[in-house]
Image (spheres, rainbow, N blue to C red):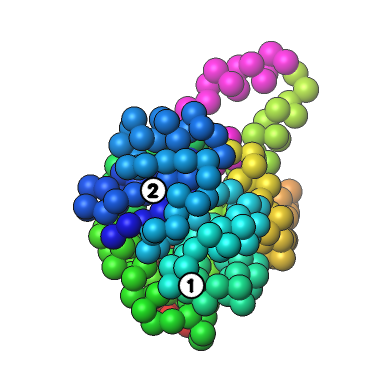
């Protein structure tokens, strides 16, 4: 197929690498000429340009821009495309995007590959990024079955685990396992920086090891992405943060009261529950999407 990728960062660049390995001809569009040149050199795309008109001959377009640019980008892009082209996006929030674009473009289906790294930009692109990772599609009642089938086939070629669910279910689920962790992790770093004794802070920075590295990783990621998660999934992020604050207050109370038995019981519960999110995360996501 002739496939377009608009936005040549980590996701767009990685997507291009894998699509080309499956024999697709990939056209890339980026805001910067230097990114286009680099994407060709890295093998992410066959052709690249800063002009959307390059995509007039494609059959499918993946929109891989930051969340805040997806809607205006598609509004501009559709003036260059024939109506039979399938458009999908990779944004981590779905409801506002699907709501805005579905009335404008019949062959649109929202998507979200649950994959990535702490790095960003075309230089971070890598092969096989999507293998065994969840890839969510959020069609509506009016999405053409042919458009769904087209994107489904491509996603399966990537080696992803494919799930379908309504946009609202997607946004609520990812607020717990993706957006909330970013906010909590960022707050952890901020709290540590609040240590008033400079010597203690310096010692903590030197002693930080795997535990801190694991829990702080997503909070030290792309600030623009974290901001847009909160902005475009505001209600669900607030809901999850408020629930988190409630449980944090419970922990504070147990420690203040020296209620070690109850604290241990709570920690035993979290110990036994974690594998349901980590080791069996694909099954749980499927259950949520099938509701």
Name the residue furthest right. 196
Q: Secondary structure at mark 1?
A: loop
**Label 1 vs label 2: CA separation?**
18 Å
Residue 45 position, x and y percent, is 35, 42
Residue of label 2:
27
Vertical side of 260 occupied by 120: above or below: above
Q: Secondary structure at mark 2?
A: strand
Q: Position of residue 291 (x, y in %)?
A: 48, 82
Q: Tell me which residue sits at (63%, 46%) in the image.
A: 226
* Mark 2, other Cα within 10 Å: few <14 / some 14–19 / many ≥20: many
Residues marked 1 and 2 touching at CB (< 8 Å)? no
Along the line of sight, which residue is nearer the eye, 187 or 47?
47
Taking the magenta stretch, the answer to whether it contains residue 218 is yes
Q: Residue at x 51, y 85 (%)?
A: 142
Q: Dot 1: few (<14), some (14–19), or many (≥20) neighbours within 10 Å?
A: few
Instruction: Tell me where the magenta segment starts and ends, as one range.
Output: 198-220
Give 145 or 4, whichever is nearer the viewer: 4
Q: Residue 98 sits in which quadrant? A: bottom right
Residue at the spot 68% in from the left edge and 47% down from the top edge: 227
* Residue furthest to the bottom: 141
Residue where numbered disc 1 is placed: 83
Judge from the rendering whether residue 36 lies leftward or rightward of residue 179; answer left or right: left
Picture quadrant where residue 116 is located: top left
Where residue 194 appears, as percent x and y from the top left, is: 75, 29
């Amino acid at each position: 197929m002739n496939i377009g990728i608009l936005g040549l960062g980590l996701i767009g660049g990685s997507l291009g690498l894998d699509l080309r390995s499956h024999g697709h001809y990939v056209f890339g569009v980026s805001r910067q000429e230097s990114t286009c040149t680099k994407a060709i050199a890295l093998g992410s795309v066959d052709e690249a340009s800063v002009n959307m008109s390059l995509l007039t001959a494609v059959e499918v377009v993946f929109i891989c821009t930051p969340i805040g640019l997806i809607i205006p980008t598609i509004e501009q892009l559709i003036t260059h495309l024939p109506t039979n082209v399938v458009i999908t996006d990779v944004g981590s929030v779905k409801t506002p995007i699907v709501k805005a674009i579905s009335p404008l473009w019949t062959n649109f289906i929202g998507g979200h590959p649950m994959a990535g790294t702490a790095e960003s930009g075309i230089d971070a692109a890598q092969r096989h990024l999507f293998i065994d990772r969840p890839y969510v599609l959020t069609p509506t009642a009016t999405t053409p079955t042919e458009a769904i089938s087209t994107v489904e086939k491509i996603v399966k070629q990537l080696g992803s685990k494919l799930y379908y669910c309504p946009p609202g279910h997607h946004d609520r689920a990812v607020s717990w396992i993706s957006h909330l962790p970013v906010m909590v992790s960022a707050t952890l770093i901020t709290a540590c920086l609040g240590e008033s004794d400079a010597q203690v802070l310096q010692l903590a920075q030197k002693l930080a090891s795997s535990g801190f590295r694991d829990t702080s990783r997503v909070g030290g990621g792309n600030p623009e992405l974290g901001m847009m998660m909160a902005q475009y999934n505001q209600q669900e992020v607030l809901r999850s943060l408020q629930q988190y604050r409630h449980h944090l207050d419970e922990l504070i109370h147990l420690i203040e009261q020296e209620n070690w038995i109850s604290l241990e019981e709570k920690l035993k519960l979290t110990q036994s529950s974690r594998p349901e999110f980590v080791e069996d995360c694909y099954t749980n996501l499927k259950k949520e999407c099938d509701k």
